Amino acid sequence: MVRSRIDRSYEKRLASLINAGDTSILNAGRRGVEKESLRVSPDGHIMQTLHPAAFGSALTNEHITTDYSEALIELVTPTFNTNWELLQYLCDLHQFVYQNLDDELLWATSMPCVVDGDASIPIAQYGTSNIGRLKTVYREGLGLRYGRVMQAISGVHFNYSFPDKLWEVWAAARETHDKSQNFISESYFDLLRNYRRHGWLVLYLFGVSPAVCKSFLRARGVELPDFNLGTGWEPFATSLRMSDLGYRNKNQSGLEVSVNSLNEYIHDLTSAISTPNADYEKIGVKVDGHYRQLNSNLLQIENEYYSFIRPKRVARSGERPTKALQRSGVEYVEVRALDVSPFDPVGVNQNKMRFIEAFLALCLMRESPLIDSSEQAVLEQNHVTVARRGREPNLTLSRNGKQVPMQDWAREILDQMQGICDMLDAGDPQKPYASALAVQSAKFDDVALTPSARIIRELRDTGESFFELSLRVSAQHKAYFMGLYQPNALRISEFSKEAEESLEKLYFLENQPRENFDIFIKNYLA
């Protein structure tokens, strides 16, 4: 293969890090996980009950909350320097949740259980405070704009920030004396652009939603080929969740948000939040004294923009995401393209997280030209193509105006990741990052090793429908956590205390003097 200019640039930068003399320069990045799961009944139907009191308040509990639906639990870990600590915390969270779920289950797959249309998806409730009401109104708007059933899709978000000690060495590698927050933000936007270019790889390697319950398709008004009774599928799909059937929906197809710079990103999101939309105006905002949505613009708030990856900064109380970024720049990135894995009781595993960490480092280090509108459209199509046809033999994707074999492009990327994995493995004789890379590389040698192929194979072998398989695995996961020997008593106690304290915070919040809700929304969106 003839090495490209981009390859040489990347190799020069990687060599600069290696020659800096600190073999651990990439180690100790901060990582965290947000994992969503539907609460379902023993027979696999979405629960209509309130968020269990044992978990505290979904508004004020940092680690056990809800996403779109009252039945959609979201487990949020703190950040850790190691993957094993993160995974242990996530395991402890699951164990605590299962101890307080009575006979309920956590649905083990991203695509929902049996749903009976939008009415069967209860919207999350956050109490009577202004911020709590705002969160519920926002979800009311999502349901009216996109349908509640789409919002019942769950996923795993991987949050990652590079170690602080990297930035000084990285500035030298980039031949700049600028080590400010502006440089760090610009570097993260280099990463974001390259993730848009290469993120289809994540869908192929980790997508595990090639099939779906037909009740979901009926509710969405779409059809897929029959796999078996009750199950629709795309024969070569990897992640229907991240396809135009799921979160890459037509409602936002014309919305362009640039990642060429922090200022452009903030400008485009702010513009979308303030640009009226005729279809949403027909819904109405406040009708007969009841809010249907926060506003009738392209986006109600920034979080409505569905993207594979987001630049983030921890926001202050009541602070919007773009305001936090504008205040202090990018702190970390949130990778949002991971399906919940039914093959892992907590939905994710260390090999996956190690690979994503190394892949993000590659996206940071490779040359990252600006993306114009025409290229962005091509990149979006590459993602959709892999989501719906990623396992198709001889699949090609568009790169630099040409169709190239996906397999060749993927192997080029994986080959370049080897040096990064060697750095991350420095001093560890087990070579966990190189091993994680090898596990993923094997999926391009044998497509049957992909999780999407694996779940199709299991459906065939058992004769189960998607619903039956998911229900069986969900019950197995509960049995696993309930049967774990000697739960971490100290951490379980911490979770109980946090739940109690969150209810106290909610009581305090709801009993404080508050401004008129109309004024609160106006000021929040200003």
Image (cartoon, grey):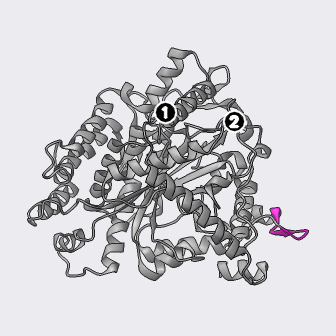
Q: Quadrant of residue 191?
A: bottom left
Q: Which contiguous range is marked in magenta?
A: 282-290
The answer, for residue 378, to whether it is visible in the render is no
Labels 2 and 1: the sequence-earlier one: 2
Q: Are marks 2 and 1 in contact (CB under 8 Å)?
A: no
**67 to 397, vertically: above or below:** below
Residue lying at 75% horizontally and 50% vertically, measured from the top left: 122
Q: Residues within 10 Å of mark 1 (few under 14, many from 20)?
A: few
Give the number of the mark in front: 2 or 1.
1
Return the mark for residue 313.
none
Q: Position of residue 437 (x, y in %)?
A: 26, 41
Quarter of the image where the C terminus is located: bottom right
Return the mark for residue 41.
2
Decide which of 63, 497 is in the foreground and name it.
Answer: 497
Decide which of 69, 475 is in the foreground and name it.
Answer: 475
Quarter of the image where the N terminus is located: top left
Q: Amino acid at mark 2?
A: Ser
322 left or right of 304 in image: left
**341 to 82, vertically: above or below:** above
Q: Is residue 243 magenta?
A: no
Q: CA distance from mark 2 to mark 1?
A: 20 Å
Q: Residues within 10 Å of mark 2 (few under 14, many from 20)?
A: some
Q: Position of residue 346 (x, y in %)?
A: 47, 42
SS assignment at label 1? loop
**167 to 209, vertically: above or below:** below
**186 to 497, vertically: above or below:** below
Which residue is labeled 1 in the image?
A: 483
Label count reads: 2
